[in-house]
Image (tube, helix red, strand yellow):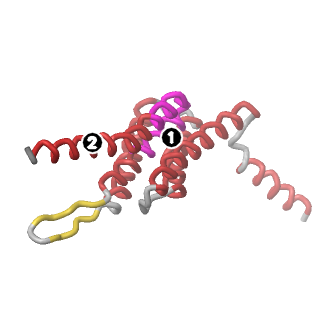
Amino acid sequence: MSAWWHEVWVTLQAEFADIGDASQLTRITVRLLMAAVLGGILGFEREHKGKAAGVRTHMLVAIGAALFVLVPQMSGSQADAMSRVIQGVIAGIGFLCAGTILKNQEGDEGHVKGLTTAAGMWMTAAIGVSAGLGKEATAVLSTLLALLILGVMPRIVSLFEKNGQDDGKD
């Protein structure tokens, strides 16, 4: 019976031995945490504006995207295989995003809701892929740019719309 338990123990050790050393553990931890934090920042902005896809959703999308590229990279996948993985992530996140888009029929014209949320989720996945590939600076820069777009552009559009209405009254 002792030999049997020893074999079980050795097998369990082998199953959990995908992280070989402290350097690899640090790399994996930094990449996944970076994806989680950056996704959380975008999610916080969306949740703060009362949107359905908030902090948890954005964090999960970013971590998932990072993990999808991190694991094959750790396994030594070549560039063509990584390209297919990234294509799969992009297509998969598209299905998730499609679920956030609603078209309401109001009178004769349709009103589309959720398009910015869907685009934000797509962007969050791209940021997660970037973090997962070890391109942390690119991921941070992309997050800052996305925050700028989500936070500043509505104000700029509002100013132009307000100015356009004022001009029409002359």
Q: Which mark is residue 69?
A: 1
- The residue singled out by tag 2 in the image is 159
User: Neighbour class for label 2 at 10 Å: few (<14), some, many (≥20)?
Assistant: few
Give the number of callouts.
Answer: 2
Compared to residue 135, the image places residue 149 above or below, namely: below
Q: Secondary structure at mark 1?
A: helix
Front residue of this view, candidates 130 and 40: 40
Q: For the point 30% across and 40% down, which residue is it?
A: 156
Q: Position of residue 80 (x, y in %)?
A: 40, 32
Image quadrant assignment for residue 83: top left
Task: Say which of marks 2 and 1 sits in front.
Answer: 2
- Residue drawn at (73%, 36%) of the image: 20
Residue in view at x 55 percent, y 31 percent: 136
Q: Residues within 10 Å of mark 1 (few under 14, many from 20)?
A: many
- Please state the horizontal and vertical placement of residue 128, each as a whole percent of the image: 50, 42
The answer to whether residue 137 is above or below residue 58 is above
Residue sitting nearer the eye, 111 or 16:
111
Which residue type does callout 2 highlight? Leu
x, y percentage for residue 63?
A: 55, 48
Vertical placement of residue 142 versus 3, above or below: above
**Left or right of residue 108: residue 71:** right
Q: Amino acid at mark 1?
A: Val
Q: Measure the alpha-carbon separation of dots 2 and 1.
A: 41 Å
* Residue 114 shown in magenta: no
Could you tell me which quadrant the N terminus lies in? bottom right
The range drawn in magenta is 123-144
Name the main secondary structure of what is drawn in magenta. Answer: helix
Of pointers 2 and 1, the one earlier in the residue sequence: 1
The quadrant of the picture occupied by the C terminus is: top left
Q: Nearer the viewer, residue 3 or 11?
A: 11
Residue found at the very far front of the displayed protein: 170
